[in-house]
Amino acid sequence: MENQYAIEMLNITKKFPGIIANDNITLQLRKGEIHALLGENGAGKSTLMSVLFGLYQPEEGTIRKDGVEVKIKNPNDANDLGIGMVHQHFKLVECFSVLDNIIMGVEPVKNGFLQKKEAREKVLAISEKYGLRVDPDAIIEDITVGMQQRTEILKMLYRDNEILIFDEPTAVLTPQEIEELMQIMKNLAAEGKSILFISHKLAEIMAVADRCSVLRKGKYIGTVETANTTMEQLSAMMVGRDVNFHVEKKPSVPGEVVLRVENLSVASKRSKEDAVKNVSFCVRRGEIVCIAGIDGNGQTELVYGLTGLEAPSTGTVTLCGKDITRAPIRQRSTSGMSHIPEDRHKHGLVLDYTLEDNMVLQRYFEPEFTSRAGFLRRDNIRAYAQRLIEQYDVRSGQGPITMARSMSGGNQQKAIVAREIDKDPELLVAVQPTRGLDVGAIEYIHKQLVAQRDSGKAVLLVSLELDEVMDVPDRILVMYEGEIVGELDPKTTTQEELGLYMAGAKKDEVKA
Amino acid sequence: MKKNLLKNSGVQSLIASLVCIVLGMIIGYVVLLFINPAGAGEAIMTVIKNFFTYSKTETQMKYLGSTLVKSAPLLMCSLSILFAYKVGLFNIGAAGQYCAGVGLALYAALGWNLPWWVCILCAMAAGALLGAISGLLKAYCNVNEVISGIMLNWITLYLVNMLLTLVKEETSPYTYHISTVNPAALIPSLGLGKLFTNNQYVTIAIPLAMIVAVLVWIVLDKTRFGYELKATGNNKNAAKYCGMAEKRNIILTLIIGGALAGFGAALLYLTGFEQWQCSTSSVPAMGFNGIAAAFLGGLHPVGAILSSFFIQHITVGGAYVDKTMYCAQISDLISAIIIYLCGFVLFMKHAMNTGIARREEKAKAKLAAAEEKGGDQ
């Protein structure tokens, strides 16, 4: 009988100091199927893929390709076996053209000269066949993220890979691009490619995958046919309990204004036009205000202007009645602003510091943690970190002395949330606080935001996720091309209406 | 317990350093074998034995003293590099900062007739000024500190040559002897010289350098200032995000690094051990050797005390090699090879860590297999 599996990973066990990342995991990928791999952060998805890619050697278990046992010692072996991967963060040379990136490493050469014409024909043929729209001569840094991703897919197909791994491919895409990607994946599967789709977005898995394997805390939970399951069932398998998708909250009781922004403009790094244009709004005690919009419409710059990472060109920012437009970052922080940054690795953490040192990043200078002579009070820092770790359930290998770098993304984010909330701020600025997190962690963080609101704090949420925008806030402000184009009430508006504002098709005059 | 000891970072640094030293000697020996096999063994032993080649204890002590005198400035240079390294900066400008320290220390002593401690302060200020230039360029114009450091090294060298020409002997390219022009500028010995067979150059400079090393350690590891500096070095965006003055920290770090190197220069030249040669055409090696000393010392200030002494010992040792068998340059060559290998400490440490991890995994697997067997029986 012909073997029906393209790749089989049987009873894989991989251990790291203090943790079993993969505990006896079996994953069987049928030929021509789209197989989703679902799990929370730290469930062992990445480790399993690294094993398949030859980056790690498992302690136990075997890998079979077409029924024959193979040894994958390094990524070159994986490549030789026809395994290709689109990483979450693309591996492209920014200043090269699409074509150059695709052929890089396997350039067709004749007498030492590049044969680009041949390569171009092959690339065009492939892109035609699978509906992968790209311009082979465009430079990577000029094209959209969606097209960059298609370039990555073409890279795999150009190398005649049969097994394609997509690592959280939709995280960076707009809704339209996600739709297109789904179609491409279906085309690829129809042509006989086998696809492994790593994700924790349940809706996408239900939409595109044939089967779904679930991992939890390094263990294999099971494999189900998506046709015979529900999202609720999948999320229960992933988290180990029932998850509430809807955020429970009481009606808000807005109080006095905490943050007032008037006619704020912030210059853009990329173009001569301002990224934020003459924006005015306010956030009151006891309410969550959400800045919604498609990525790149000035939200990042607006936050930079508010938090002091970038100086605004005009306008004023007032926090609790104090003008902080030109105040240093430290002063903003001590006068009651907390900031969960958009990029936790760039801004949120010192990755080579221990967890405890990161926990006091906003407070290390306070008398509790620094003696008058300028010495750190290590005992107090340890005790404080220990308390936050327990209270906010931050999981790590070695507790307070774990290096931040070695923690899973979800727990890194939890550590930041703990640090910023425990500062007891008047205003919490949370920028995409759930980006890249699994449903369990998302639920947790949403609860924390609502708890802040209910205790009388002002919360400014910046989000790109439609579900989050509809569910969490009490008011929605939509940003489009640096301006606030609409104020919506999440209770009465619809996703469609929100979408029209986000796309710039609808526009109101908004007064602060 | 043994496993835990091997996993200790300090112990690892020590072992890695020793491995590097031994490797350096082996390669040095091989080079000597190639040049002249007859004397190779003896020559490499001479480098290591160094002043022990003298039979009399008094002579040995005297030369040990001399090595210590030159270890103090090397220690300061390695601290300068180490301090900046912890803040994520590579202060290759330590060589120039050291050079500036020589210039101002000597000019303050010989030109302005100032007492020794003021001369030291002048030297530190000179080094700090150079550091500040690199720091400002880095913080405000994003000029790599390595580039600006190297260029400043040469600018400083020739400026110092010019400056010290004003206080040099008429008949030679060397500066005046401090002991004849301004004895008050000599760092006091406080009887330390007597311990080393009346080696007049052994002064409180040596204990001073060691105290500074301990201070650097305390500042980096125990204080808020050190916490801020290291955070800036590891992730300057995060430092900015949490309200640290990250630009100020970069500038301050290079100023402190410069002051340390300048201090080192004063510690050597204010003993009268050497005179500056105003026709010098290369930046003194002291600053560059500081890089090797910093790494050999496991990037720990206290480790730097030992490594600085060792590197100075090897540098001096080269001079004892039999010149009838080898050309004169051999001494520098052999010291250079050993010092070069000293730079590989981090690599060795990494190799050790992977080795340990692998062995542990294997041991665990064996244990698990044994347990399984036990269960079967």
Image (tube, helix red, strand yellow):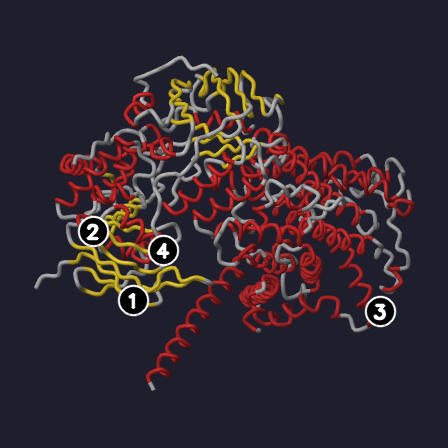
For badge 2, the amino acid type reads: Arg
Same subunit, tags 2 and 3: no
Whether label 4 touches label 3, CB < 8 Å: no
Q: Chain of mark 3?
A: B
Q: Are marks 1 and 4 in contact (CB under 8 Å)?
A: no
The answer, for residue A161, to whether it is visible in the render is no
Q: Are marks 1 and 3 on the same chain?
A: no
Circle 3 — which element? helix
Residue holding disc 2:
A211
SS class of the residue under badge 2? strand
What amino acid does circle 4 point to? Gly
User: Can you identify the residue that label 4 sits on?
Assistant: A44
Q: Badge 3: how crowded within 10 Å, few (<14), some, or many (20+)? A: some
Give the secondary structure at mark 4.
loop
Q: Amino acid at mark 3?
A: Glu
Q: Which residue is mark 1?
A: A61
Q: Secondary structure at mark 1?
A: strand
Which percent across, then down, holds residue B343? 58, 55
Mark 1 touching mark 3, by CB under 8 A?
A: no
